[in-house]
Image (cartoon, helix red, strand yellow):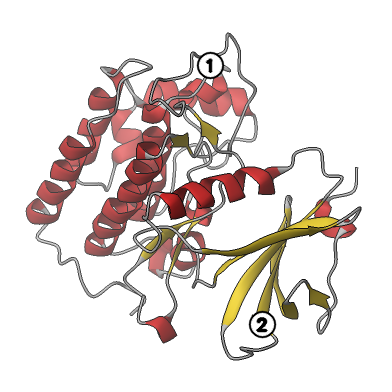
C-alpha cells in the first residue's frame, strides 16, 4: 500500500488555499509537514500538515477535533499549538496549519551526550509533558501515542526554548461525552501507539484509559533520564509486553537504574487506579519536585539553551 507521503507531495512555491509552500520539513508514515507562509504576511511562518483524502485512517480529522477543543477551552499556548487554518482540496487531500515549533524531545535526546538529558532538564521536561497530558485529559481526550517524538520545544526566535508542546493527536480518542460522563470500554481494542512506549493495556488489547497515557509518559521520562529503555532491542511486540510486565515487579531496577528513586513510586499510584478513575496527577508532580530536590538538580538552564 502506498504511504500518504507518496500520494501527497506539494512542490515548493505551490499554493494550498491561502498558504504558499516554502519547503518540506519532514514526513512520516502518516503524512508530510511543510513550512508555509501567507501571501500577505510572507515573514510569518507556520507548519502545514497534509493527508490524502482517500487515506483510510483519516488521522487529521482527530487532530483538528482536538485542537478545536483546545481553542474552545482556551488552553492554546500552555502546551498546545494554535490551529491557524484547516481545509481540503476535493478529491485530493486534507490539510491543517498550525504554529511552527522547534525540535522534538526525541531529536534533542538523540543529540545529547550519552543520549540523555541532565537530571534537572529531564525532571523539568517530565513535569511539563505531564501537564500537557493532564490538560488533554481535562478536555476529554486520551492521546494514546505518548512518546518523545510527539513533544517539541518552542522556537528560539519566539524565546520559547523552555516551553514544551504536545503534538500529533491522530491516535487520540474521546473518552468523555459532552455531559462529562465517561464512555464504556470496548471488549477488545486494537493496538494503538508505538510499541516501545505503549502501555501494558495495549499489549493485551485492552481499552486504554487515562492512567495508560501516564504509563507511556513514564517510559518516555525514564529514557530521557538514563538514555535507554531495557527492551529497546526487542523486535516482537509480545516480548516487549512481557518485559514491561516484569519491570513492574521482579525487574524494577532493570527499568529504573540511573533514575531518581521517586520514579519507581509512579507505578503503584497508577496500578491502584481503576479504568474510570482520574489519575493522581498532583501526587506525581510532588514526586517530581522531590526528585529535583533529592538529586540536588537545577531546573534551568535546559541542556539545549
Where is 31 relative to 177, above or below? below
What residue is rendered at 29% in x and 58% in y? 122
Marks 1/2 in contact by CB < 8 Å: the verdict is no
Residue 96 appearing in the image: no
Where is 2 relative to 40, above or below? above
Disc 1 is placed on an element classified as: loop
Of residue 253 and residue 81, the one placed in the foreground of this image is 81
Disc 2 is placed on an element classified as: strand
Query: Which residue is identified by label 1?
Result: 206
Of residue 113 and residue 137, the one placed in the foreground of this image is 137
Within the image, what quadrant is residue 165 found in?
Answer: bottom left
Relative image position of residue 147 (x, y in whole percent): 49, 47
Relative image position of residue 257 (x, y in whole percent): 29, 42
What residue is rendered at 53% in x and 16% in y? 206
Screen quadrant of the N terminus: top right
What residue is rendered at 56% in x and 22% in y? 203
Where is 180 relative to 56, above or below? above
Residue 57 appearing in the image: yes
Relative image position of residue 67 (x, y in whole percent): 52, 52
Instruction: Tell which circle, 1 or 2, labels the residue nearer the N-terminal end.
Output: 2
Of residue 221 and residue 260, the one placed in the foreground of this image is 221
Relative image position of residue 106 (x, y in whole percent): 50, 59
Query: Which residue is identified by label 2?
Result: 38
Amino acid at each position: 500500500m502506498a504511504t500518504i507521503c507518496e500520494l501527497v507531495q506539494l512542490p515548493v512555491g505551490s499554493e494550498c488555499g491561502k498558504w504558499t509552500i516554502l519547503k518540506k520539513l519532514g514526513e512520516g508514515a502518516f503524512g508530510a509537514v511543510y513550512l508555509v507562509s501567507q501571501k500577505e504576511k510572507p515573514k510569518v511562518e507556520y507548519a502545514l500538515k497534509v493527508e490524502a483524502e482517500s487515506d483510510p485512517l483519516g488521522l487529521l480529522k482527530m487532530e483538528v477535533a482536538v485542537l478545536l477543543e483546545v481553542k474552545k477551552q482556551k488552553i492554546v499556548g500552555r502546551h498546545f499549538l494554535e490551529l491557524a487554518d484547516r481545509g481540503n482540496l476535493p478529491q485530493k487531500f486534507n490539510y491543517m496549519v498550525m504554529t511552527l515549533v522547534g525540535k522534538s524531545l526525541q531529536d534533542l535526546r538523540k543529540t545529547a551526550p550519552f543520549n540523555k538529558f541532565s537530571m534537572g532538564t529531564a525532571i523539568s521536561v517530565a513535569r511539563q509533558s505531564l501537564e500537557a497530558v493532564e490538560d488533554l485529559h481535562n478536555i476529554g481526550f486520551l492521546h494514546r501515542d505518548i512518546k518523545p517524538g510527539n513533544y517539541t520545544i518552542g522556537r528560539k526566535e519566539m524565546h520559547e526554548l523552555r516551553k514544551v508542546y504536545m503534538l500529533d493527536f491522530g491516535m487520540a480518542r474521546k473518552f468523555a461525552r459532552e455531559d462529562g460522563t465517561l464512555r464504556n470500554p470496548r471488549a477488545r481494542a486494537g493496538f494503538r501507539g508505538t510499541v516501545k512506549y505503549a502501555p501494558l493495556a495495549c499489549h493485551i488489547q485492552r481499552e486504554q484509559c487515562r492512567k495508560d497515557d501516564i504509563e507511556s509518559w513514564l517510559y518516555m521520562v525514564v529514557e530521557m533520564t538514563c538514555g535507554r529503555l531495557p527492551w529497546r532491542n526487542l523486535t516482537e511486540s509480545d516480548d516487549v509486553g512481557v518485559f514491561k510486565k516484569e519491570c513492574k515487579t521482579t525487574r524494577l531496577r532493570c527499568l529504573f537504574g540511573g533514575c531518581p528513586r521517586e520514579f519507581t513510586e509512579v507505578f503503584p499510584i497508577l496500578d491502584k487506579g481503576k479504568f474510570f478513575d482520574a489519575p493522581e496527577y498532583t501526587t506525581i508532580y510532588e514526586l517530581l519536585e522531590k526528585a529535583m530536590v533529592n538529586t540536588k538538580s537545577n531546573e534551568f538552564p535546559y541542556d539545549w539553551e
